[in-house]
Image (tube, helix red, strand yellow):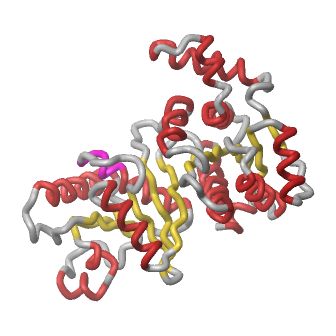
Amino acid sequence: MERKASQDPKRVVFAEGEHPKIIRAAYNVETEGIAQPILLGRKEEIQAQCRELGLDYAPLVIDPNQSDKRKVYAQLFHERRQRKGVTLSLANDILRQPNYFGALMVDQGDADAFISGVTYNYPEVLRPALQAVGTEPDRWVSGVYLMLVHDRLYFFTDATVIIEPTVEQLAAIAINAAQLAEEFDVEPRIAMLSFSNFGSTPHEQAIKVRKATELVKKLRPDLQIDGEMQADVAVVPELMARHYPFSQVKDANVLVFPHLAAANTAYKLLSRLGGAEAIGPILVGMAKPIQVLAMGADVRDIINMTILAVVDAQFKSQNNG
């Protein structure tokens, strides 16, 4: 992925530009040719942080409070949200906030991707992004974790956004994850997870997963997808071949959980007890490349997320161009 990102580095704007972890990560991705960082914050403070960190680094810095772009973005945001109670005066105040300013930079083509979250709760980043950028047409937003397990890559979803998905949302979550896998040149094999295997336990929750599977097949007949199925059957080809040889999916690499609690619990247990590396969460379905870091993310997490954001921006640029 790092090699893919460095082939066409993109402009990545970081909301928390004064944070030492962000500065270290920005220095790394710029010196490695992975991205062109833009740090939001006070230039003097960021320069002082660079000196304190021992970095010979002069990053591109934009202060939303001093930028001429703030009034331009505020006017645009006001026009979009004026029937949501946002006056022009309020919009000018809102655009002082880096999560709004950075998202609108990407929306207006002044940056290619936006990253925030080290010091914010997830909704504090997602809400401004949805208001400033919005979703792709007819798409739901969902979150995916890349899980590296014994040198194998899996996509776990949705662990961050939709708490109790409907049939339609569950189908969208699966399609979102499949598209992400394709961005990373991985052929998706999608398992729609449940406590039931292909009708073995009749229950409304299992039926919902089955209906979502059928909907995905209708919307994306090109995808390999099956369900409902239990997690062990999904990832152990021998079990699938022995008990359910009719299945269209063997050895799944995209695992779609029935609700957020299951996905969130699974990825955290696997990373803490199973030694897997979790990369993410990756936000999928946004109109522009917007990514939300886990609060307290370390420098390596930020670098990984930047790589993912660059690849996402490359993909969107190719498909929109």
Q: Is residue 247 left or right of residue 201?
A: right
Q: Could you tell me which quadrant the C terminus lies in?
A: top right
Q: Quadrant of residue 207?
A: bottom left
Q: Please identify the residue farthest to the front as the structure is shown.
A: 52
Q: Quadrant of residue 106?
A: top right
The image shows residue 215, relative to residue 5, as above or below, that is above
Q: Which residue is rendered at x = 71% and y = 47% of the image?
A: 12
Instruction: Identify the magenta region.
Output: 167-172
Q: Which residue is rendered at x = 50% and y = 58% of the image?
A: 180
Q: Is residue 192 left or right of residue 122?
A: left
Q: Could you tell me which quadrant the N terminus lies in?
A: bottom right
Q: Please identify the residue farthest to the right as the structure is shown.
A: 56
Note whether residue 289 is visible: yes
The image shows residue 82, relative to residue 188, as above or below, that is above
Q: Which residue is rendered at x = 50% and y = 83% of the image?
A: 150
Q: Which residue is rendered at x = 54% and y = 33% of the image?
A: 128
